[in-house]
């Protein structure tokens, strides 16, 4: 169930087709997941979202591909996005996440959530030692 | 400003002192940050929280220490915990996070938050390919 | 699947019937959506919730009806309420939201979520120029 | 620092004065906290918010006053509202919350947050036994 | 649909079996809900999570069992965890939550969420009277 | 207090200077708020974030500029971003938001948050009539 009607023949729009082709070429697959099919209702949104995903997630950088997926999962869990939790857990597994790493990821997410809420309940002042903006 | 009055002479309680000593020994420092001072008002909560932090964050495991801090920061940002964002950003920096890695972390957090909310706005059905519980 | 058993013959309670009648009269429809059927288990909660929805959303005011629905969707997305995202997207469409406006709404929600989390990750101090409570 | 300029002489508006008087009479105090001063910029919002707080929080009901405050704190922590965490922790303490109960509240909030995020990370299906809407 | 494949014969692991047996003994039931079946993929995570749930939720303490469940539900709602809302609403009902108490819980959660967001929109300064850390 | 040290002489980097100049030209001001100063530590993040803000918020489109700011505030409140609530409330006021519209915005945000959490507490099934993806 979605808030959008399916887009018939979305790929007839050359801008949509170009993005879909680039997704397949970048990911070396012919599988286009539902997010991109849905965003095809607005080519600007589709193009800009894919460009950002490609630049940040699919380009070699200072963090390795699996670490990036673990961070993506963590944010998606905390933000309560079922779709993204599923798609990025699948992506992390495809990039080599083991069951032990998955369990450890869950442990860190759970621990962080717990201390986040305890610290918020206590309204703790930040230790001056943590202030990166202070002159030292 | 906090929701708790400061705990006078907390370390006179031997259970509190034992935790504080273990924090210093584990972290090779004599700095105890505000979270632990505050939790000293309830030794059981202090002991159990520190035991979990030590087991998950300060014990060698399948994820390296910096990756664990990056995940912790990501969750803390999404959950809106100012204290934890500060303390774990400082920890990540102490464990070698570079400015380029910090910028990349912010980029992934921002991108994930954006797609999380767009996917939630679209109420996308999860692709069957992402269902790890399906028999294959 | 719900956390409440269905309420049999809820409209036999005259307070429930009065609210249902007013919903239909106000909205010029005979469709009562699931939220109101569920709230019928407690007439006070049903009456007070509908009174507030009617006063804020269905009474002419300084914001036009479509703008109000767009704001409602935005909050519901950020709070992760699937039911409200669906019901208010349908309401916005009934009040004239075009596909282009829907795409723009998604773009703003996504951008705001992204900058929200980046600003929280940076723990930025608020610029004094933004302080409405300062004497000027 | 606030997003609203202070309201000069708010109590000259008889609707504002009536609410302030009722707050003092209901709470048996002459202290009006900042939320009500701020809401005075819009008498309708002030009146309706106070009426709801009074009806739900300050009227004898099926839950005792301290339990209601504990629930209020829990929600405010999870929603990240610093102001409400402070004001309702003070209210809970005024209604008799002990340090042991405060510690237990923090423990439950922390545990719930942890299992919430682990369950969301796992995308667990709800057990049919938990479905209150099923015919039995 | 889950992000984990089912664990075949999880109880053949004696650590898993010990936890499952303790859940049944503690709860006086032979029903093991999905959370525990899923966590069986990592015995350490299973053991530590159950130990914490047992210690906090199933041990006599300063808050009565029903109050603890109400707080758990409140946090789970605010954090958007469908699984936990279902499981803890069922638990609260098993511990005696009446329909009137359920309606009251919903009223408090709704009111808190509303004032949380209004207070955040106003960026209210905390009243000095609420500062528990101030010397008095 | 921030998690980043201030960037000395950020404008000496021509990419930073180009963005700052474009912000001033687009907004017809010489005021650069803290977000942009902070993002200057990574020119790619600065450029991409500003390009997106400019395209979505500062380009004529199907939604008027004030409506866009109201949506931005709503998301920022729900996500708990103090910085963004302040900056976009100031922006909305600069674009003509009246006190009455501000009060109405707060009322809608508060009402949506309340019904979001009540609907999540009830785990309501979405009415089939709201399913935009259904064939009709």
Image (cartoon, coloured by chain):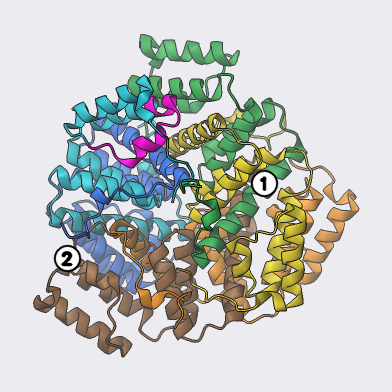
Chain colours: A yellow, B green, C brown, D blue, E cyan, F orange
Instruction: Say what secondary structure mark 2 lies in.
Output: loop
Same chain for marks 2 and 1? no
Q: Is residue B12 magenta?
A: no
Q: Which residue corresponds to mark 1? A: B106
Q: Residue at x 73, y 68 (%)?
A: F54
Chain of the residue that carries numbered disc 1 in the rendered image: B
Horizontally, residue B124 falls left or right of residue D110, namely right
Few, some or many residues within 10 Å of mark 1 (<14, 14–19, 20+): many
| Image spot of residue A119 (x, y percent) | 45, 36
Q: Nearer the viewer, mark 2 or mark 1?
A: 2
The answer to the question of whether label 2 and label 1 lie on touching residues, with beta carbons closer than 8 A, is no
Q: In which quarter of the image is residue A25?
A: bottom right
In the image, residue B97 sits, relative to residue D20, either above or below, namely above
Does residue D8 appear anywhere in the picture? no
The picture places residue E59, in percent across and down from the top left corner, at 21, 27
Q: Is residue E68 above or below residue F111?
A: above
Where residue A73 sits in the image (x, y, percent)?
56, 45
- Residue at 40%, 43% in the rendered image: D116
């Amino acid at each position: 169930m979605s808030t959008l009607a399916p887009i018939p023949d979305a790929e007839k729009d050359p801008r949509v087709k170009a993005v879909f082709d680039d997704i397949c070429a970048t990911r070396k697959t012919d599988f286009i997941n539902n997010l991109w099919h849905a965003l095809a209702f607005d080519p600007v949104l589709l193009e800009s979202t894919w460009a950002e995903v490609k630049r940040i997630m699919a380009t070699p950088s200072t963090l390795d591909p699996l670490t990036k997926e673990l961070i993506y999962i963590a944010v998606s869990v905390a933000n309560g996005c079922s779709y993204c939790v599923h798609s990025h857990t699948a992506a992390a597994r495809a990039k080599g996440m083991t069951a032990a790493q998955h369990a450890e990821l869950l442990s860190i997410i759970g621990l962080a959530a717990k201390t986040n809420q305890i610290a918020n309940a206590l309204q703790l002042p930040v230790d001056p030692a943590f202030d990166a903006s202070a002159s030292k």
